[in-house]
Amino acid sequence: MKLHWVKSSFVLLSLNLAACTTNTPAGGGATAAGGTGPAVAQDAMPEYCQNAATTQYGATAGNITTESAVARGGGFLVEGTADTGQKTYGFNCRFDSKGNFIGISEM
């Protein structure tokens, strides 16, 4: 019974880690399948990006700033910074043309 619990925990941990990875290719463009998740309105993209960055960088929302979303490359881009207390990161959040979140890439 204990072995089953360990296997189940490992599978859940693996799924959680997979969900934390970004979907952004090395070139920073959209993936062939587009973004994931529900469509986000353009004016809500900075807040969505801020929430995603809290997970990505381990910083609190108060230490993450985001700019307004701008149309770029057939989708939308939100630029931001995250201050972890150790380092400040610059990043971009990308959304496809329908507003679906693609991922975060570090600048």
Image: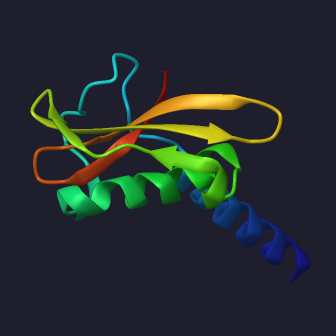
Q: Residue furthest top?
A: 27
Position of residue 8 measured from the top left corner of the image (x, y, whole percent): 71, 71
Asked if residue 88 lies left or right of residue 90, the reply is right
Q: Quadrant of the N terminus?
A: bottom right
Q: Residue at x 60, y 46 (%)?
A: 56
Q: Residue at x 68, y 58 (%)?
A: 60
| Residue 101 vertical position relative to residue 48 in the rendered view, above or below | above
The reply to whether residue 18 is in sight is no
Q: Residue at x 70, y 51 (%)?
A: 59
Q: Residue furthest bottom?
A: 1
Q: Residue at x 49, y 21 (%)?
A: 107
Q: Nearer the viewer, residue 45 or 95?
A: 45
The reply to whether residue 11 is in sight is yes
Position of residue 32 measured from the top left corner of the image (x, y, whole percent): 18, 34
Q: Residue furthest right?
A: 2
| Residue 45 vertical position relative to residue 97 in the rendered view, above or below | below
Position of residue 33 measured from the top left corner of the image (x, y, whole percent): 19, 42
Position of residue 66 measured from the top left corner of the image (x, y, whole percent): 44, 46
Q: Nearer the viewer, residue 95 or 1?
A: 95
Quadrant in the rendering for residue 77: top left
